[in-house]
Amino acid sequence: MEGPRKPAAQATANPMPTSSLASDLVNASLLSKELAAQAERRSQLYGGGLDTVLLEMGLLDEKTLVTHMANLTGIPAAPLERLARPDLNAGPWLDAGAAARLGAVPIGRHEDALEVAVHPQADHDALVAWAGERHLLVEPYLVTEARFRGLLGVVYHIPVPPRFVSLLARLMGAAAARRWLALAQPSPPVARAPSPSAPIDEVETLMETARLGDEVTRRSAWRALGRRLHDPRAASYSRSLQAKLASPDVGVATAALAALAELRDPSSVPAIIDRLENEDGQVALTARSTLLALTGDDLGPKKRRWLDWWEKMRQRPRLEWLLEALAHRDPEIRLAASQELQDITGEYFGYHYDLPERDREEARRRWLDWWQSTGKRRFSQG
């Protein structure tokens, strides 16, 4: 005789992971179903690959994770000692834009093969096609997303995002990561004499790059335009992106959200809030992560709480939003806010996101004192 059915609430108590990596980790008894589902959800909300989230949550060590991913993909894991000494002379074989697009960074030459560190979500077929067009033999080695982003920075002198700086410090040790990532500092720009006959229109150039560049250059252009929102053309560009959020095409809407996340235009908050309860789950999740990047807060998936926040904060400069975020309960939000404050202002008051709470609050107080005495006048349009 058939027994009683379980209540619906019990049926969803143990969510199943949806990605192949999470499923395989569960099947290998390296992760529980509950933790795998939690990590997937965190990846959707905060971005980053599942491997990044698993390392941030401390659920697996890097060697175990990479070994398992290598078995899953068939791409051999990169020896960690090899990653510490990439051959910078191999970089010119692949430009930065193509490296980001293909998910592969050259780390050396071995006999006739170009050795590349491969991102977990790299398009292997595209990499093979690229190598075939150039009659190159490529020898791929799988690395975590954090290692890939670090190598991308070191080989091409691209600043490494704070999230991956923090994770690499945990993986390598703070001192070793600091020495290694010093190689990622961008080279000083080469001064060029302006041409009186053909002056460069910086905003137009940035807008063109934002439309037509590869992923790396587009993101750089969006961020640069965000620092020029006082220019009517940059502000108009932001409004055009906000209008695209209403598109029924999921790809168009999520691409616009990605651009607005980099642009950091406070006026875009209401339009982004409007997509939070979108019928497409991916658009809603991307809208929430965009609000997180823009506001330095995470109020969940419901419009009402965000609209209340907007009513309270809309008249305050965005730098004050970031100063509030220095006290947030989520360490990742504190880290992002502190890094952006330093980038925008050039100031540093001894704040670090993982200091003990008392020390952290003392450093935040120094930030607040600076804001009241000096910063508010300097950045009145924050």
Image (tube, rainbow, N blue to C red):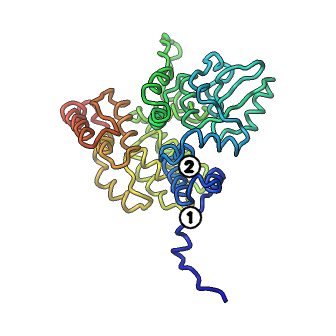
Residue bearing the label numbered 2: 254
Quarter of the picture containing the N terminus is: bottom right
Answer above or below: position of 179 versus 16.
above
Report the front residue among 3 and 307.
3
Answer above or below: position of 23 versus 159.
below
Report the front residue among 290 and 170.
170
Horizontal and vertical percent position of residue 8: 54, 76
Kindly state the secondary structure of the residue where label 1 is placed: loop
Residue bearing the label numbered 1: 15
Report the front residue among 150 and 95.
150
Q: Does residue 27 appear anywhere in the picture?
A: yes
Q: Does residue 225 appear anywhere in the picture?
A: no
Label 2, residues with CA under 10 Å away: few <14, some 14-19, many ≥20: many
Mark closer to the observer (2, 1):
1
Horizontal and vertical percent position of residue 134: 78, 23
Q: Is residue 52 left or right of residue 309?
A: right
Horizontal and vertical percent position of residue 52: 53, 43
Residue that extends furthest to the top in the rendered view of this protein: 193
Do the numbered discs 2 and 1 sit on residues whose CB atoms are within 8 Å?
no
Q: Amino acid at mark 2?
A: Thr
Q: Is residue 289 left or right of residue 320?
A: right
Q: Residue, x 70% and y 19% (percent of image)?
A: 109
Sooner in the amino-acid sequence: mark 2 or mark 1? 1
Horizontal and vertical percent position of residue 39: 52, 52
Q: Residue, x 42% and y 62% (percent of image)?
A: 302
Q: Residue, x 61% and y 50% (percent of image)?
A: 251
